[in-house]
Amino acid sequence: MPGLTTAALPEPQRAQLSNGAATVQLDLPDAPVVCLDFWCKAGSGYEGTQESGLAHFLEHMVFKGSERLEAGEFDLRIEALGGNSNAATGFDDVHYHVLVPPAAAAESLDLLLDLVLRPRLDAADFQMERQVVLEELAQSEDQPEEVAFQQLLRLSCLDHAYGKPILGERDALLRHNPASMAAFHQRSYRSDRCCLSIAGALQQLDLSAQLEDSPLAELKPASDNTSPRPLNLQAGEHRLELQRLESARLLMAWQLPSAADQQMVLGGDLLTTLLAEGRRSRLVERLREQLRLVESIDLDLNVLESGCLVLLEAVCDAEQLPSVKREVRAVLEELQQQMPSNAELDRAKRLVGNGYRFSLEAPGGVAAMVGNSCLWGRHHNLQAPLDWLEGWTCERLSRELIPLLSPERAFALEAVPA
């Protein structure tokens, strides 16, 4: 495939601690830093009926300290070591990561595992942090664009976790207490539901003994085999009027196969790129460049374990919405009737392939990639996605994926200024 070349990467070194907790390490000798990335199957999709928002709230509370660390001490010590830290909660999983100089990796690993696996969950801190989370929720609800997208997911995903806000429902957040959060942590942060990923300059580092004597090695396996519930996205239409919405929006959602089918994920990335990345892509060229119907049009692939989501957003004047809907449908129907050209597919392969290569340039990106793959039992080599790209032809796209993006399979939401 034409494009950037990538130096060969070593095979990730996968292992398990005695309790079954997974680890994966990748030595990048030329990297100036080391990334420690702890992953857990504890996203909002694993919340029970009374636990709305607990996964994200817990992510906040983790940084309020452990039995050993006072609130804020973790960040101060990581910064003193020359590093930085962050975390993110999704539907399927949550991860906490630090980026530090190699010499600080061992100490940072000790701090990270203590913080994440032994959170203090102090009652006073809990009350304070609840207000922070509620303010974050209020800010999201105050952005009409966010409200529209949440409505799209709620209406299309129905009672599935993907249709519910990761931030949680306000009433539920007000009911939560440290005991319920501790129960969620104890149930979710289990040895067979976690993975520690380490990438960077590891030549002088041997963390094996440290890991076997760490809080990660003390975790017990889960008592059940809970798996993500399959998504069954519903097709349909809805119109929504929103105060303070500056421009109208056409939002659409389609379902593709789940993240477990990595080859289909690559195909979905190719298809969304072919349709809406760059001025030469079909939707952008037709609706923005030629007809000037939209201010912008985006089509994104969201890789998820219960079923991937393709989400479209077209921003336009309200009076142009009918024309925008008609032209989006026309572009998609044309693609159904006649397969894309080899030139279109080659362009998409270059863009997707180069984007993947760029993601391999930094230890943080590599640690996230191999950590997420390890968490979900995907053990392919880092070169494999580039090989999978080459396996996609125009005929295969037309046969396996393009029918899944037919207008009839979409949920479409029109959001207009009130």
Image (cartoon, rainbow, N blue to C red):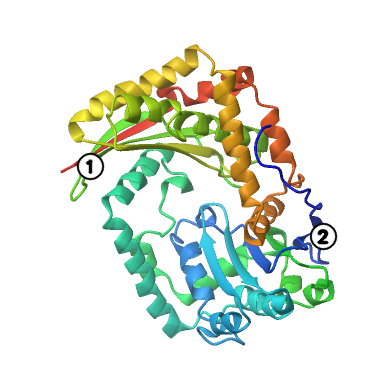
Picture quadrant where residue 390 is located? top right
Q: Residue at x 46, y 46 (%)?
A: 162
Which of the image's four quarters has the C terminus? top left
Q: Amino acid at mark 2?
A: Ala
Task: Where is residue 127? Give x, y as percent.
Answer: 39, 79
Q: Is residue 313 visible?
A: no
Which residue is found at the position 44% from the left and 74% from the top?
177
**Separation (CA) of disc 1 from disc 2:** 51 Å
Q: Quadrant of the N terminus?
A: top right
Q: In this image, 30 relative to 184: left or right?
A: right
| Residue at 61% across, 63% down | 188
Q: Which residue is mark 2?
A: 15
Q: Nearer the viewer, mark 1 or mark 2?
A: 1
The answer to whether marks 1 and 2 mark residues whose Cβ atoms lie closer than 8 Å is no
Q: Which residue is mark 1?
A: 247
Q: Residues within 10 Å of mark 1 (few under 14, many from 20)?
A: some
Residue at horizontal 67 percent and vertical 34 percent from the top: 263
- The correct choice, above or below, for 258 with respect to 201 in the image is above
Asked whether the viewer can see residue 12, the reply is yes
